[in-house]
Amino acid sequence: MRTSYFPGCSLHSTSGEYDKSFRAVSALLDVDLVEPKKWICCGTTPAHATSRLLGAALPLKNLSIVEEEGFKEVVVPCAACFSRFKSADHEARHDPELANQVEEVIGSRYGHSVKVMHPLEIFGDGAGQVPFAHKVTRPLAGLKVACYYGCLLTRPPKVMQFDNAEYPMSMDRLVAALGATPIDWAYKVECCGASLALTISDVVVGLVHKIIEDARARGADAIAVACPLCHVNLDSRQKDVEKKFGTKPDMPVLFFTQLMGLAMGIEPAALGLARHLVDVSRLIATVA
């Protein structure tokens, strides 16, 4: 499979381990990832919070580049980028005036021929395009995982059209195919506080506490995520949770692509596992 791949800013910086593990797994599964030439930031929250036109123009410029390069689909791992791509495409389709304004700004007319996909839609035996179970050499048997989707991947449903908005299962099925046990829990689509970590950090600390406490209460050994910002908050705020609530979370938080890599026998260094703030060595030892 050969597909366009939009890493976004986070996967080239703070969440390099997501990019690294996604590339490693894709290479093992013969998925050729092609970055669009001269791609730009999707704008994320600041763009659409500032200007509706800017919030649509930045993602559609990227989709226009992908379209010009001849691809019919683009895989977008970052939940924020995935959300902005889907939202901008939806808005332009339903608002001709906005579409005309975007065309004037970006200097080209996007033909809406590119399907925006998440890696969870690509990987999967049966549901996805690329089977992977045959590559599992070290099943994650005995590992209980809380699959955390966050608030962006599935909402709003009419725009995202991804999984079940309130109780998605695509990551759960993937984790089960790796040999691990996905737990049934209450916080899989709750918000982690996102960028409030920079402005009202106490809110984020409280949300992270609730998310981790519920995962632990249901027996989780680790939390799997699909969003760079979710990973940053859940991984980096555990010391703050300990100070504020007197608990000791010590909960490993991994990208689902890192779990895939571990189960497929890819070395931890090639998956960026040393970048985590919460130590994952004990978890690695259980599946080595």
Image (cartoon, rainbow, N blue to C red):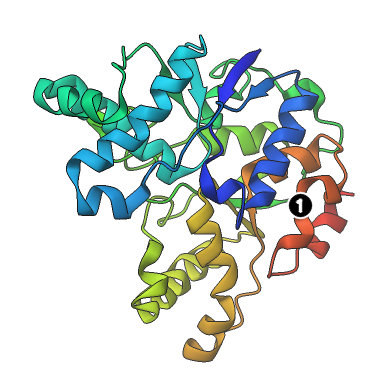
- The answer to whether residue 250 is left or right of residue 42 is right
Residue 164 appears in the picture as rendered: no
Q: Residue at x 64, y 14 (%)?
A: 2
Rendering coords of residue 275 (x, y %): 73, 61
- Relative vertical location of residue 113 with respect to residue 94 in this rendering, above or below: above
Q: Considering the image in quadrants, where does the N terminus appear? A: top right
User: Is residue 104 or residue 63 the one in the foreground?
Assistant: 104
Q: What amino acid does circle 1 point to?
A: Gly
Judging by the rendered image, the residue that carries numbered circle 1 is 272
Q: Residue at x 54, y 75 (%)?
A: 237
- The answer to whether residue 123 is left or right of residue 62 is right
Q: Secondary structure at mark 1?
A: loop
Residue 149 appears in the picture as rendered: yes
Rendering coords of residue 99 (x, y %): 18, 23
Rendering coords of residue 252 (x, y %): 67, 63
User: Is residue 121 or residue 68 the one in the foreground?
Assistant: 68
- Relative vertical location of residue 225 with respect to residue 217 in this rendering, above or below: above
Q: Residue at x 16, y 22 (%)?
A: 100
